[in-house]
Amino acid sequence: MNLERLVAVSGRPGIFRMAANRPNGLILEELDSKKRMFASGRVHQFTPLESISIYTDDEQDTVDLKQVFRNMFSQLETLALPTSKATPQDLRSYFLEILPNHDTERVLISDIKKIIKWFSFLNDRGIIDLEPDPVVEEPTEEENTEA
């Protein structure tokens, strides 16, 4: 699962792929239609999904959104995904199943709703999977000196 170029944009529903970066905004691509559009940085705020982390109570302090999505995907058959319009208690209990150590004071119900909407959106398009990301190996010192 690669969230690298995926962004959430304030004022626009769904998730977009960043096609290009401009000094005054981004060129966004819709995931379904591949239609491109310009979004001004003066009007919109952009949140790369790769940079989002969820607060936890343990020593790690946060968990990447990618790991939360993997947890949700792996439990999809056994644990029904609630709608974003479910009661706050249902949303919290679902999230406690997915990420038991999340910080219940700092992770708000509105955050859980967003995560569920994003997961549904990306899963419907086949972007969510359990495959580990390819590891990019750094060249060793020997390889650097040979070149």
Image (tube, helix red, strand yellow):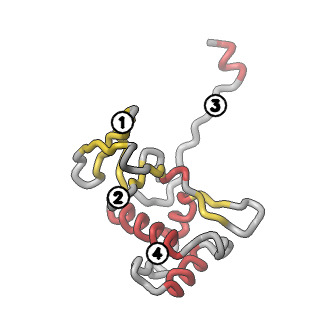
Distance from label 1 to label 2 (Cα)? 19 Å
The quadrant where residue 64 appears: bottom right
| Quadrant including the C terminus | top right
Q: Secondary structure at mark 2?
A: loop
Give the vertical position of 125 relative to 78 (above or below). Answer: above
The answer to whether residue 17 is left or right of residue 131 is: left
Which-is-in-front pick, marks 4 and 1? 1
Disc 4 marks a residue whose amino acid type is: Leu
Residue 138, numbered circle: 3
Tag 4 residue: 76
**N-terminal label among 4 and 1:** 1
For the residue carrying disc 4, how many other residues have a C-alpha within 10 Å: few (<14), some (14-19), or many (20+)?
few
Name the residue tied to disc 2: 11
The residue singled out by tag 1 in the image is 20
- Density class for disc 3 (Cα within 10 Å; few <14, some 14-19, many ≥20) is few
Q: CA distance from mark 2 to mark 4?
A: 29 Å
CA distance for labels 4 and 3:
35 Å
Disc 4 or 3, which lies upstream in sequence?
Answer: 4
Crowding around mark 2 (Cα neighbors within 10 Å: few <14, some 14 to 19, many 20+) is: few
In this picture, residue 78 sits left or right of residue 136:
left
Q: Secondary structure at mark 3?
A: loop
> Between marks 4 and 1, how big is the CA–CA gap?
34 Å
Tell me which label, 2 or 3, sits earlier in the chain: 2
